[in-house]
Image (spheres, helix red, strand yellow):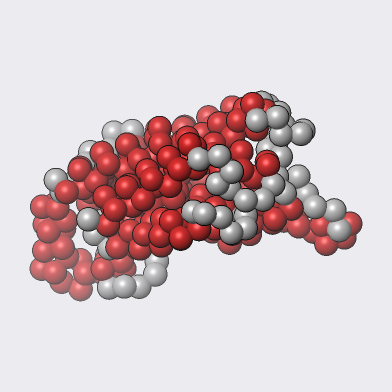
Amino acid sequence: MLAWSLAVLVLVASLMGVLVDGVYAGAESTSAMLRAYDLVSLALVVPALALATVGARRGSMRSRLNVAGLAAYVVYTYAYYLFGTGFNDLFLLHTAVFGAAFWLLVLTLTGVDGAALAGRSGSQKHRRAAAAILALLAAALGGMWVYWAVDNAVTNVVPVGSQLVETGLVVHLGMALDLALLVPLYAAAAVLLWRRLAWGYILACLALLPGILHQVSYLVAMPIQVAEDVPGAVGTDGAEPIIVLLYLAATALLLGGTRDATVEDEKRTRLAGETSGPRGASGASGASGGAGWWRRGRRP
């Protein structure tokens, strides 16, 4: 029910953002960026969330994980709507979207059996290659923002966040979100995936699906700013194809050869853990150990 509610909220918010002139307050560059994000939500996020919700209701663990990934994307993106601009006519709607997405993410993760999914994933070589890419993305993103943060502290010059035209507030928010959320997520996913723990598979999916959508949103926002005559706007970013390729390659490596799991698989995994004694319950190594930590509420 919450997933369908989120889909409707995002649909309404995005339609109003695209169709209603002047609905976004603040800088013209930010308004154009948010309208681009609205287009991506209408074209990709809402349909994908609907499909994933249908699959999740049928018991697909992969669909549940997709729901969580889409919710994570909405949480990150709508932080810009709430905190990257001032009050506007859609403030309450954006607040509802942000809150619904956050709680959908939390509640959905409690129903995902990482052990069942990780146990059906592809070869260890592919998983470790995906982990290496995630580590590279974490190091590149974290290193870039740390450098610019130190430079700002020394020179008091606001860094250029990307090829998008962005206000200082948007750049500051992007740096804070990436350093506080994305960089630790990518790094943790890389380490745990390399160690073959179930949480590694889960976190990797939470990093890659939203990450691909972030890149699509960025690619759409640049020409939208150009079309709306934002001063200084450019239509492309020369480095973006490499970044997109890294996300796609990591996703293909992670999901290649993976078979879906169902609620019945989750029940069998839990039953096996309960009947296999202390070693089965704690999971000395591998994916089942990560799932055991999860079910007991401990952090991996």
Quadrant (top left, top right, bottom left, bottom right) of the N terminus: bottom left
Q: Residue at x 46, y 60 (%)?
A: 92
Residue 280 is left or right of residue 148, and the answer is left
Examine the image and state in which quarter residue 44 appears. top left
Q: Residue at x 40, y 36 (%)?
A: 42
Q: Residue at x 26, y 50 (%)?
A: 4
- Count the marks: how many? 0
103 up-or-down from 168: above or below: below
Q: Nearer the viewer, residue 138 or 71?
A: 71
Residue 161 is left or right of residue 137, and the answer is right
- Can residue 201 be seen at all in this image of the molecule? no
Give coordinates of residue 62: x percent, y percent: 26, 45
Quadrant (top left, top right, bottom left, bottom right) of the C terminus: bottom left
Examine the image and state in which quarter residue 192 appears. bottom left
Q: Residue at x 82, y 57 (%)?
A: 152
Q: Residue furthest right?
A: 155
9 up-or-down from 281: above or below: above
Give coordinates of residue 139: x percent, y percent: 63, 49
Q: Nearer the viewer, residue 236 or 286?
A: 236
243 up-or-down from 178: above or below: above
Q: Nearer the viewer, residue 9 or 280?
A: 9
Residue 184 is left or right of residue 156, and the answer is left
Q: Nearer the viewer, residue 56 or 6?
A: 6
Give coordinates of residue 17: x percent, y percent: 49, 42
Residue 275 is left or right of residue 47, and the answer is left
Give coordinates of residue 7: x percent, y percent: 32, 47
- Can residue 141 be seen at all in this image of the molecule? yes
Examine the image and state in which quarter residue 104 appears. bottom left
